[in-house]
Image (cartoon, rainbow, N blue to C red):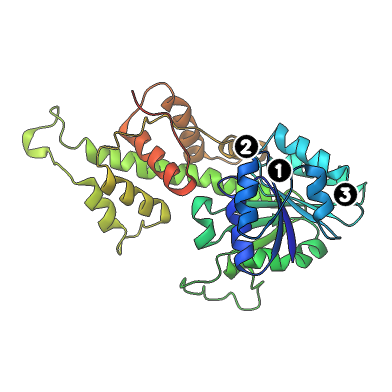
């Protein structure tokens, strides 16, 4: 199939590369001409303008927008929708607020344009590992685009099958799900990222306690000087708390036991706030996720080792760059 990609950053560019590896054709656009040229050298069709980008797509066109949530995504979708036609599809694969998806989907439907929202997890490792995708949109449209999603998904890999799943949608075990109508994909991804906040905070606080187990305030025979890199590594092997986040933590600590290159300043990308707001709307208690969000706010004023652990994990899975410590 053919897919057009707008936004060739950390994830957009690698999505294009993974699709081409699986035999799909691609048309690309980015305001950075060097990014376009780089992918064109790998086999994509480059575009100098959004209008040229749309013109190079075969009908029914499919354009994937992979840009930061907010005004730039809104403006880009408005622009390409103005030159697309009945039956074409616009995909938003960024971290858009799900209620914006619902609004956009209704507006585009009146113009005959289909809208699909794809919550995309995989970060900078997605080219090799594949992307876990949570998809919202009309069933017929999502099904037609299945070759694209199947190519991007990680596949079953060596994860054991869950008993009792016979007869269920086989796409789930490949790492992607049609979660529901427009907005459902980004809603599920929002909760995914809210949970991510809580998991990261639990690891971060645990390692901070271990690091401070030898402080002078403790009795001499109650002090321990732990090797955090070794503890992270041993927990990866047979314990009940392994995860990719722990893998990233182990790597970071092995490279830099004090994490001195990390400031401890931890951003929140929006989904954590939206998750807490959804919990409030639904009257669902979410103490851990709320506390994890507020810890990120506090990190911008004072920094602990726990926050350096958070910074290290974010750099590992998403390539996020934090301000350097002074």
Q: Residue furthest left?
A: 221
- Pick whichever of labels 1 and 3 is earlier in the sequence: 3
Residue 203 vertical placement versus 262 (above, below): below
Please state which of residues 181 and 5 is positioned toward the viewer in this rendering: 5
Instruction: Tell me the tag on residue 84.
Output: 3
Q: Is residue 103 visible?
A: no
- Secondary-structure class at tag 1: helix
Q: On the rendered structure, is 286 left or right of 236?
A: right
Q: For mark 1, what is the residue?
A: 98
- Separation (CA) of disc 2 from disc 1: 9 Å
For the residues labelled 2 and 3, the Cα–Cα distance comes to 31 Å
Q: Residues within 10 Å of mark 3 (few under 14, many from 20)?
A: many
Q: Is residue 210 left or right of residue 131?
A: left
Q: Nearer the viewer, residue 218 or 248?
A: 248
Snapshot quadrant of residue 270: top right
Q: Position of residue 68 (x, y in %)?
A: 64, 38
Which percent across, then down, holds residue 139?
A: 79, 63
Query: Alpha-carbon neighbours of circle 1 within 10 Å: few (<14), some, or many (≥20)?
Result: many
Q: Is residue 274 above or below residue 113?
A: above
| Residue that protrudes farthest toward the top in the picture | 301
Identified at 33% across, 34% down, the residue is: 261
Callout 2–callout 1 Cβ contact below 8 Å: yes
Quarter holding the N terminus is bottom right
Q: Quadrant of the C terminus?
A: top left
- Neighbours of disc 2 within 10 Å: few (<14), some (14-19), many (20+): some
Q: Secondary structure at mark 2?
A: helix
Residue 226 sits above or below residue 324 on the image: below
**Which of label 1 and label 3 is nearer to you?**
3
């Amino acid at each position: 199939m053919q897919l057009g990609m707008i936004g060739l950053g950390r994830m957009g560019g690698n999505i294009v590369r993974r699709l081409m590896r699986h035999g799909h054709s691609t048309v690309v656009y980015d305001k950075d001409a060097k990014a376009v040229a780089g992918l064109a050298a790998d086999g994509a069709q480059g575009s100098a303008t959004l209008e040229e980008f749309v013109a190079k797509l075969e009908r029914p066109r499919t354009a994937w927008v992979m840009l930061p949530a907010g005004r730039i995504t809104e403006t880009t979708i408005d622009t390409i929708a103005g030159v697309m036609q009945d039956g074409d599809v616009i995909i938003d694969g960024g971290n858009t607020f799900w209620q914006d998806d619902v609004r956009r989907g209704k507006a585009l439907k009146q113009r005959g344009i289909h809208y699909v929202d794809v919550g995309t997890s995989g970060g900078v490792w997605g080219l090799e590992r594949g992307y876990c995708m949570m998809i919202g949109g009309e069933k017929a449209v999502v099904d037609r685009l299945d070759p694209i999603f199947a190519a991007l998904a990680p596949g079953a890999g060596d994860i054991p099958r869950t008993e009792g799943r016979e007869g269920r949608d086989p796409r789930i075990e490949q790492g992607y799900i049609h979660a529901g109508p427009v907005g459902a994909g980004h809603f599920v991804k929002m909760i995914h990222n809210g949970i991510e906040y809580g998991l990261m905070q639990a690891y971060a606080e645990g390692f901070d306690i271990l690091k401070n187990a030898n402080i002078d305030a403790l009795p001499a025979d109650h002090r321990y000087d732990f090797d955090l890199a070794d503890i992270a590594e041993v927990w990866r092997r047979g314990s009940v708390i392994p995860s990719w986040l722990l893998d990233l933590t182990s790597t970071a600590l092995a490279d830099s036991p004090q994490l001195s290159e990390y400031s401890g300043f931890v951003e929140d990308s929006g989904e954590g706030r939206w998750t807490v707001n959804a919990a409030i709307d639904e009257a669902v208690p979410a103490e851990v996720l709320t506390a994890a969000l507020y810890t990120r706010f506090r990190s911008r004023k004072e920094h602990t080792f726990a926050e350096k652990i958070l910074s290290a994990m974010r750099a590992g899975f998403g390539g996020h760059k934090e301000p350097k410590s002074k």
